[in-house]
Image (spheres, grey):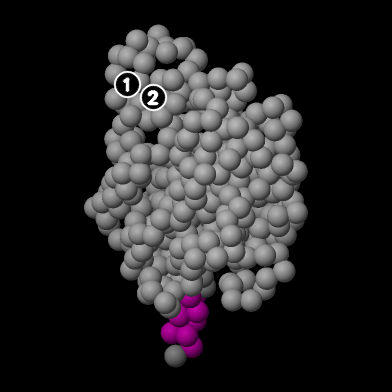
Amino acid sequence: MKKTVKKIFKVLGIVLGVILLALIAYIIYLYASYHRIEDNLALEVEPAPDAGEDLEGLTSGARPASASALYNSSLTTGQEYSALTYNLGFGAYTPDFSFFMDGGKSSWAKSKESVQNTIQGAGELIASYEPDFALLQEVDLDSTRSYHVNEYSILRTCLSSYNSVFAQNYDSAFLFYPFTQPHGSSKSGLALFSRYLVTDSLRRSFPVSTSFSKFFDLDRCYSISRLPVDNGKELVIFELHMSAYGNSDAIREGQIRMLADDMQKEYEAGNYVLCGGDFNHDLKASEDDSENRESWAYPFPRASLPDHFSFCIDQLTDEERDSLWDSARNADMEYVPGETYTVTLDGFIISDNIECVSYDNINTGYTYSDHDPVYLEFTLK
């Protein structure tokens, strides 16, 4: 009997030892493979797939013989333009999808076909609005969670008359959590699509957590893309995806301060500034509003914005703002109208030399993502 007990304890000891060694090896792997993508990284501006041979030899600011709107060398003051921002949720968030980081069930999309259909549907929806600029977040290049579907490639096909810029904000090691369906490795980022030629673009790295939680958060960033205007100035488009999941006040404040400083520099240089994306803050709530919202849905601190900047949503009347469809749903459960928590996390900031002509949150019932698009029409003064 004693020998049997000893054998059992010996086997258990070996098993626990192997598990412990594997855990230590995995933690070493996580830390050894962790890296942040370079800050102030120049981004490639990719010509529209439909451009064909027209772009051969084209230099920044040049205009080919076809003279289509796509190749205009500059924007025009007083002319109306449109922009759309949309977090695509890596193609996973059909209305019945819930995500483990939000308290839901799944860490992968339902299937490869579901990812392809969802991104295709979102791309066609975007194209139907014919925005001059589309700012898209959570676009996967090669991720376990989205079955290694290159979503950027699908979107470039859907928006084939647009130039594009991709800013990667996630290049993670393989995450073995949750254990029932490990989240895996991910390569993902922000995509800007433009009907007009972008002269150059830059990736800026947001400050992020340095604790163990950094392995579960994106390598947050924003892109800064430049387009010439006919008066010698530039329209500077900031596209962002800020941190979520209850990060520290210091990180949130650091991200907002960095963004505000960069926007302020562009305004002081005489440029027009349009900033859009997923702010991961409740854009409808006032700073002293603590009722009827989730603990992670912090109101955006308007006082942190530099002078001459404002959210487009703040230029609406109280009635117009309150009646806006919420741009995001909580993914702790499937979407159930009237039951699932919804909030507006997405939108645009503009400098005061840009006029907001119209502004709307598009209601798709979260068909293609846990977010819905936000659409803006504007003019450069």
Query: Does dot 1 land on a helix, a strand or a loop?
Result: helix
Q: Does the magenta segment cover residue 286?
A: no
Observer-nearest residue: 129 or 122? 129
Measure the alpha-carbon separation of dots 1 and 2.
9 Å
Residue pointed to by mark 1? 51
Q: How many numbered circles are shown?
A: 2
Q: Main secondary structure of the magenta part?
A: helix
Q: Residues within 10 Å of mark 2 (few under 14, many from 20)?
A: some
Q: Position of residue 22 (x, y in %)?
A: 51, 59
Q: Amino acid at mark 2?
A: Leu
Asked whether the beta carbons under mark 1 and mark 2 sit within 8 Å of each other, the answer is yes
Of labels 1 and 2, the one closer to you? 2
Residue 27 found in image quarter: bottom right
Observer-nearest residue: 215 or 310? 310
The residue that appears at 67% across and 73% down in the rendered structure is: 290
Q: Residues within 10 Å of mark 1 (few under 14, many from 20)?
A: some
Q: Does the magenta segment cover residue 7?
A: yes
**360 to the left or right of 235:** left
Q: Which residues are magenta?
A: 2-12
Image quadrant where one finds the N terminus: bottom left
Query: Does dot 2 land on a helix, a strand or a loop?
Result: helix
Residue 231 found in image quarter: top right
Observer-nearest residue: 317 or 6? 317
Image quadrant where one finds the C terminus: top right
Q: Amino acid at mark 1?
A: Ala
User: Can the viewer see residue 84?
Assistant: yes
The residue that appears at 41% across and 56% down in the rendered structure is: 362
**198 to the left or right of 365:** right
Q: Position of residue 373 (x, y in %)?
A: 43, 52
The residue that appears at 62% across and 55% down in the rendered structure is: 314
Q: Which disc is residue 70 wearing?
A: 2
Q: Position of residue 262 (x, y in %)?
A: 69, 36
